Image (cartoon, rainbow, N blue to C red):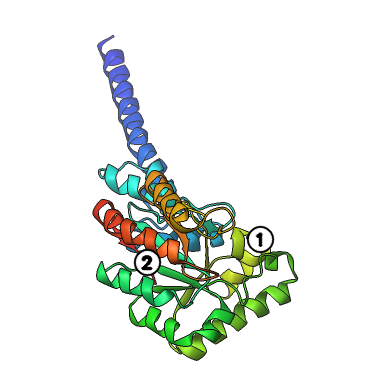
Amino acid sequence: MTRTRLVLGALISAAVLALAGCGTDAPSAAWHGSPAQSGSAGGAGGGTQAHPISDATAQAAAGKPSASASASASPSTSPSASASASPAAAPKDGIMRQTGGAQVALTFDDGPSADTPKLLAMLRQHNIKATFCVVGVAVQEFPQYLQEIVKDGHTLCNHTWKHDEKLGKKSADTIRADLQRTNDEIRKVVPDAQIKYFRHPGGNFTPAAVQIATELGMTSVGWTVDPSDWNTKKWSGNQMTQHIITTVRNNTKPGAVILSHDGGGDRSATLAAYKTLLPELKQQYTLVALPL
């Protein structure tokens, strides 16, 4: 009887040790086998915070999850970092509409024009950088103002050759020729210009336009705040100025991309509005140009 008990005890001890060994390996294999938790997918890392827009957009074009998706799936000791990255979740259409952080981006379309130097002087006064979505024919007409934009350290964005709102529905060859012609004109004036962004006139992006812009090395950029300063048929003068101020004040939030215009018509109301808005926005937000 004693010998039987000893044998049973030995068998039980061996079984316990075997089970303990299996339990140790299982969690380790599950952890390393999960890219979201291990950080091997989604591009999570220092580069995401340095260039939230360009990184997230590149991931969108490649069909990869963004850093924010990875961060939300994994345990984190930095809630603020996760929160700042969340707006940059890769959009299905490949168009970035937010900065991907708490920063706010000012963008100005349809120039350069005779009003551009006045806007540049205001931005210079407040040490604010912005993004200028320029039109090819306007660059051709006012090359000196494009040079001033670049000299002041602002970011350039391709806004097509002559603001063709239907360009995205045309053939791939036509779209590519238009965007390339615009880039060529910009580089004729500023040979070393970096043109990493594209904005379709009217926001009429199509999959073909987004894809071709990507092939030409440009990220497609939309917006979150539109004060409609382009709609001079509906508002003008002081009424337009107050409309711009009110719209921007009421709708700007962390991560916003604000659309306005420095060309395409009389922009005196826009200039008047930003004389008020620039110091206010600077006090409330970190204002940035889209990163190069």
Question: Left or right: 147 with respect to 174?
Answer: left
* Foreground disc of the pair 1, 2: 2
**Label 1 neighbour load within 10 Å: few <14, some 14-19, many 20+:** few
Q: Which residue is mark 1?
A: 207
What residue is disc 2 on?
289
Image coordinates of residue 230 in percent, x first then y, are 54, 60
Residue drawn at point x = 28 percent, y = 19 percent: 9
As helix, strand or loop, the secondary structure at mark 2 comes to loop
Q: Residue furthest right?
A: 171
Q: Is residue 262 above or below residue 229?
A: below
Viewer can see residue 209: yes
Is 258 displayed left or right of 174 in the figure? left
Q: How many marks?
A: 2
Structural distance between the alpha carbons of marks 1 and 2: 25 Å
Q: Is residue 155 above or below residue 145?
A: above
| SS at circle 1 | helix
Q: Quadrant of residue 160?
A: bottom right
Where is residue 161 shown, x and y percent of the image? 61, 77
Work out which quarter of the rendered image holds the N terminus and state it: top left
Relative depth, front residue between 78 and 222: 222
Q: Quadrant of the C terminus?
A: bottom left
Task: Give the x, y percent position of residue 250.
Answer: 39, 44
Label 2 is placed on what type of residue? Ala
Q: Quadrant of residue 132?
A: bottom left
What residue lies at 46% left-to-right and 90% top-to-bottom?
A: 191
The image's mark for residue 21 is none
What percent of the width, then of the height, locates residue 155?
A: 41, 73
Position of residue 136 relative to residue 286, above or below, is: below
